[in-house]
Image (cartoon, rainbow, N blue to C red):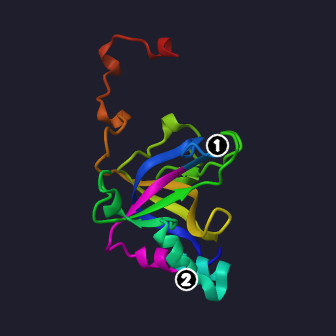
Amino acid sequence: MSATEFRLDNVRVAFPNLFKATQFNGTGNFRCGATLIITPDHPQLPQVKAAIEAAALAKWGEKAAARLKAARAKNKIALTDGDLKSKYDGFEGNQVLSANCRGGATEAEATKPTVYGKNPKLGPITEEAKSPIYSGCYVNAKISLYADDRFGDGVFCSLTGIQFAADGDAFGAAPARADDFDDIADSGGEDPAAWA
């Protein structure tokens, strides 16, 4: 694991797009990803900032400081001030990390992050309908920060895996869960086998 690759723990997630790659900003590039919300007092925020600096240094050497400054001016750094996007729930007062998977020319060519529930030993979750992750919950995310200059200088964040960590106040409506309902199977009525 390089110095710029690590697990970011206990951060809130917004806009999780983990199972079906969608076209990014009309570019023709399909990708999955999520926005990770990091509080100012989060113990790993300095690690994220250091990883950005390290990625720039590894790519551009002695020109890293100048190229990072130019990239920040053009908003081409994965970590941004949430106040700049305060119209979104949970962003204000926090740092926001845009984490994406490697894109592709088609939905099928794009990579997807490995998604886990609280117990990763149960294996990855492969269907969106079975995922506990929703906008506003807390997650642990396996990320890697890297510098790139193919489309102008920038430092970006790759998302390779994500794990549900805890419930949080949902941004918008959270999906209903099985434990939101009582077990009424013994009360008669419908036959679940008929639903299949």
Which tag, 1 or 2, sits closer to the chain's start?
Answer: 1
Q: Which residue is mark 1?
A: 28
Residue visible at 49% across and 49% down?
A: 117
Q: Residue furthest bottom?
A: 62
Residue 113 - label: none
Q: Is residue 2 visible?
A: yes
Taking depth in this image into account, of 164 and 109 the one nearest to the observer is 109
Three-letter code, disc 1: Gly
Where residue 101 appears, as percent x and y from the top left, is 61, 54
Check the picture and name the quadrant holding the N terminus.
bottom right
CA separation in Å, label 1 and label 2? 31 Å
Residue 124 relative to residue 188: left or right = right
Residue hosting label 2: 66
Few, some or many residues within 10 Å of mark 2 (<14, 14–19, 20+): few
**In the figure, 78 relative to 43: above or below?**
above
Residue 88 belongs to magenta span: no
The stretch of residues the image draws in magenta is 33-51
Q: Residue at x 59, y 83 (%)?
A: 64
| Residue closest to the eye, 150 or 134 | 150
